[in-house]
Image (cartoon, rainbow, N blue to C red):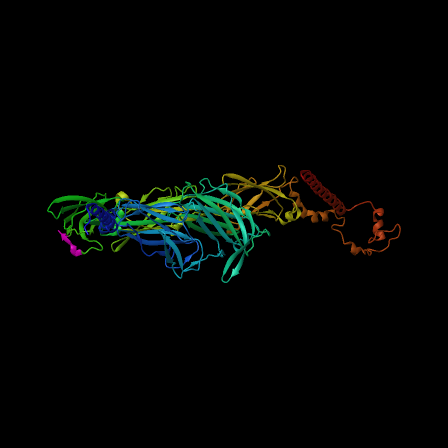
């Protein structure tokens, strides 16, 4: 059957429509094909470095003591770990370390990631608020290979734990870290040391420091309930006491726990007495008295004194610079001393290192490392490089290298470049002469890669890709002979600056030891040694303690060993041995007693009181005591006075006093100067001397004084003059009657015969012997009357004075 034209056209249109439909369903979308090609191209392209930082094992150790021992509560622990950036670093890249719970960063600080050459690769920020350290890289090490470094942070362990591991994070990744020793952090129990103990610490601001003095009651028992004098002095990094912040003293019970005593309950608290701070703020004196209820120092209690000081400039204390607090306590006749040094222990540091591509690196050192002290800081050495590149081109460049530092070539070199190094223009340092340079392979460098030339004074090598050729450059050094200087500073006594101190020294020169002496005043002016020694010689300088000792003062020395070791430098930079002496006045006491010139006078006038006045100078103020004494009394109620204090004692007698000027005597020779006017000057000696001053009184002569008392000795003799029977026969020989015999009216007195009683009637004539007896009797009566009148006059005058 044959189709007509119209039908064929309709059929053809249908076929085309079906073909288009099938094409749309089968043929892939062209856009989808293009995206797939682009992704394949990205996959095939080199990947960009991720710039990650990897961290090594974290080590924890003790900062003080054996680093491998277990940590104790409140000690500082060092956290150390290495890091590396295999793909290098870029500006702004950072990592953050967060320290574990129980470890405390005190304050904010910023430290740098620094290379040995002094290049700064970034800053690290310590944050006390969230206990973290964040290090941020700058662009200094961008483009370098093999970038690595280390981080060191010292953190206080504040919580005790029995766990052997602690958890911390770096960049959000957790790390489990072992604690040192047997593991854990040993807790500290508040215990009594059993002796005078000073303790100090810095607060979080490292500006204010707290101090505590623990005093066992057994040290104070000798004082009974009396006040005890305490002296605190500061040295080292300048601190000041606050005159407006008086210390407090507390009392605590103590319980025995095994072999140690632990502090228990507080049983008393009060402020100290007489708190005084010196003008420079470095010395505080005060008195303490028992704060417990008994009012007595008790041996079973522990007493604590607490107070604070601040840095003199009000700024945080610098790292690793100590401040020492010395406390001296005078209890009765004994003196106790202890001291404590505190520092800003928090310390952090970081390092960084990176290799410049296809270059070289020079390290500078001295053949004798101990001679490095002669080289001033920031001294640079010049090294010249002659370079022939792999394409035959030549050029030269110079680098500056610091002592014990590393410096790399300033530009990248094609692999296979030939470099020849030589040292030029060694620095000019007065008193120092450099020997010829010597090149060698540095640590980690294969010596076979180097060609040493002209007696090792030059070196030649061929560069390689992706690492530096490392060479070591050393020099010998020599210097002219030079002296050393002794610098002496002294304070605490009036003539400290002018007082001469004696020092002995010994210096080892080769196989010999040379000795000598140096005399230096305490004014801080350097005094050169009398001899000169080769540069680098070690000398030991020792202060003569006898020449430094002053009577009446306690000597505090820095250094405590009285020795300094110095190494001889150049004449232009003379090394100094520094010594500091501080003198603290010691204290003593005295007592005064009263005596009469004779025992008879003491017995008769034992109840009379004598008035005295004592005056002395203390801290620029005149102080006075008034007191009274009877014969045999002793007055000792004087405060503890600095040794050598002059005390003037005067006896206060009325103008019309019958007493003669008193005599002052002491039981220690030279301690008393009697002025002969009723006063004396007494020099205070050590408490051990038991100085006793005796004031002796005597009466004046004549009736106005007490000279009449001497007449008492003749009263028995006068009695013989007044007796009517003097020189006669004893009445008993006349037949005296018994004492109780009755007598008849008108009869003779008892013991007398009738004849004797009637004898006057028989005759009125007396014999010469009788007349002499009568005259003597009258004279005796007159003398007795005169003595009685004199006594009466004295008693009336004395009564009026009272």
The location of residue 616, given as percent across then percent down, is 52, 41
The location of residue 110, given as percent across then percent down, is 35, 45
**Would residue 793 be counted in the magenta stretch?**
no
In this image, 312 relative to 384: left or right? right
Task: Pick whichever, 225 or 188, lies toward us.
Answer: 188
Instruction: Pick out the residue farthest to the front.
Output: 1
In this image, 129 relative to 230: left or right? left
Task: Pick whichever, 305 or 50, lies toward us.
Answer: 50
Instruction: Pick out the residue farthest to the right.
Output: 745
The structure residue drawn at horizontal position 65% and vertical position 43%, both measured from the top left corner, is 706
Residue 411: image quadrant is: top left
Task: Pick whichever, 472 or 644, lies toward us.
Answer: 472
Q: Quadrant of the C terminus?
A: top right
Task: Pick whichever, 285 or 664, lies toward us.
Answer: 285
Residue 664 can be seen, yes or no: yes
Residue 697: image quadrant is: top right
The structure residue drawn at horizontal position 85% and vertical position 47%, both measured from the top left corner, is 762
The location of residue 666, given as percent across then percent down, is 53, 47
Instruction: Pick out the residue farthest to the top.
Output: 655
Instruction: Pick out the residue farthest to the bottom.
Output: 258
Residue 63 can be seen, yes or no: no
**Would residue 449 be counted in the magenta stretch?**
yes
**How many marks on residues?**
0
Q: Is residue 310 above or below residue 338?
A: above
The location of residue 359, given as percent across then percent down, is 19, 49
The segment highlighted magenta reads: 447-455
The structure residue drawn at horizontal position 13% and vertical position 44%, both measured from the top left corner, is 395
In this image, 313 relative to 469: left or right? right
């Amino acid at each position: 059957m044959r189709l007509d034209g119209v039908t064929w056209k309709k059929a053809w249109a249908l076929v085309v429509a079906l073909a288009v439909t099938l094409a749309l369903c089968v043929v892939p979308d062209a856009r989808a094909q293009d995206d797939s090609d682009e992704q394949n191209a990205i996959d095939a392209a080199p990947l960009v470095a991720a710039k990650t930082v990897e961290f090594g094992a974290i080590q924890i150790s003790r900062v003080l003591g054996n680093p491998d021992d277990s940590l104790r509560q409140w000690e500082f622990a060092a956290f150390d770990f290495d890091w590396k950036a295999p793909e290098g670093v870029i500006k702004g890249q950072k990592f953050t370390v967060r320290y574990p719970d129980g470890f405390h960063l005190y304050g904010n600080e910023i430290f740098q990631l620094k290379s040995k050459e002094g290049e700064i690769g970034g800053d690290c920020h310590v944050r006390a608020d969230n206990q973290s350290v964040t290090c941020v890289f700058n662009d200094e090490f961008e483009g370098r290979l093999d970038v690595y470094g280390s981080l060191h942070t010292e953190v206080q362990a504040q919580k005790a734990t029995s766990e052997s591991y602690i958890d911390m994070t770096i960049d959000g990744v957790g790390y489990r870290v072992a604690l040192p020793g047997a593991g854990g952090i040993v807790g500290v129990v508040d215990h009594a040391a059993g002796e005078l103990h000073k303790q100090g610490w810095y607060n979080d601001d490292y500006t204010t420091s707290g101090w505590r003095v623990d005093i066992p009651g057994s040290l104070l028992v000798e004082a009974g309930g009396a006040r005890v004098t305490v002296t605190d002095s500061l040295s080292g990094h300048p601190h000041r006491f606050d005159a407006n912040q008086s210390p407090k003293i507390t009392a605590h019970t103590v319980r025995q726990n095994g072999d140690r005593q632990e502090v228990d309950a507080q049983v008393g608290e009060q402020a100290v007495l007489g708190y005084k701070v010196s003008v420079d703020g470095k010395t505080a004196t005060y008195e303490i008295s028992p704060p417990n209820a008994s009012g007595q120092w008790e041996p079973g209690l522990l007493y604590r004194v607490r107070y604070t000081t601040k840095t003199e400039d009000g700024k945080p204390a610098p790292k690793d610079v100590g401040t020492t607090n010395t406390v001296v306590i005078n209890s009765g006749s004994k003196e106790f001393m202890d001291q404590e040094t505190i520092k800003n222990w928090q310390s952090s540091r970081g390092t960084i290192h990176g290799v410049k591509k296809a270059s070289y690196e020079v390290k500078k050192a001295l053949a004798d490392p101990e001679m490095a002290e002669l080289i001033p800081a920031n001294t640079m050495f010049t090294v010249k490089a002659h370079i022939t590149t792999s394409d035959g081109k030549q050029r030269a460049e110079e680098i500056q290298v610091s002592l014990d530092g590393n410096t790399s070539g300033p530009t990248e070199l094609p692999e296979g470049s030939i470099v020849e190094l030589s040292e030029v223009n060694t620095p000019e340092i007065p008193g120092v002469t450099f020997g010829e340079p010597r090149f060698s392979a540095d640590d980690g460098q294969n010596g076979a890669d180097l060609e040493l030339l002209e007696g090792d004074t030059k070196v030649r090598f061929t560069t390689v890709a992706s690492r530096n050729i490392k060479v070591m450059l050393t020099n010998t050094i020599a210097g002219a002979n030079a002296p050393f200087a002794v610098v002496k500073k002294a304070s605490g006594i009036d003539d400290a600056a002018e007082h001469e101190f004696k020092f002995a020294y010994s210096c080892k020169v080769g196989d010999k030891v040379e000795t000598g002496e140096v005399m230096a005043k305490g004014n801080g002016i350097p005094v050169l040694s009398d001899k000169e020694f080769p540069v680098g010689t070690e000398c030991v300088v020792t202060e003569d303690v006898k020449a430094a000792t002053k009577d009446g003062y306690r000597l505090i020395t820095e250094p405590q060993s009285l020795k300094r070791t110095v190494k001889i430098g150049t004449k232009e930079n003379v090394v100094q041995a520094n010594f500091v002496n501080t003198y603290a006045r010691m204290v003593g006491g005295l007592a005064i007693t009263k005596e009469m010139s004779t025992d008879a006078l003491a017995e008769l006038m034992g109840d009379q009181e004598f008035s005295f006045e004592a005056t002395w100078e203390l801290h620029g103020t005149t102080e006075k005591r008034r007191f009274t004494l009877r014969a045999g009394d002793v007055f000792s109620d004087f405060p503890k006075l600095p040794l050598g204090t002059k005390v003037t004692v005067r006896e206060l007698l009325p103008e019309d006093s019958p007493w003669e000027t008193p005599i002052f005597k002491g039981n220690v020779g030279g301690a008393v100067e009697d002025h002969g006017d009723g006063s004396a000057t007494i020099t205070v000696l050590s408490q051990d001397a038991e100085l006793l001053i005796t004031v002796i009184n005597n009466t004046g002569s004549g009736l106005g004084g007490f000279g009449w008392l001497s007449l008492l000795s003749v009263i028995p003799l006068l009695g013989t003059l007044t007796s009517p029977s003097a020189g006669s026969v004893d009445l008993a020989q006349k037949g005296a009657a018994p004492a109780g015999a009755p007598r008849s009216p008108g009869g003779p007195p008892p013991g007398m015969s009738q004849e004797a009683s009637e004898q006057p009637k028989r005759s009125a004539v007396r014999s010469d012997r009788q007349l002499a007896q009568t005259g003597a009797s009258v004279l005796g009566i007159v003398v007795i009357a005169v003595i009685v009148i004199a006594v009466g006059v004295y008693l009336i005058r004395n009564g009026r004075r009272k």
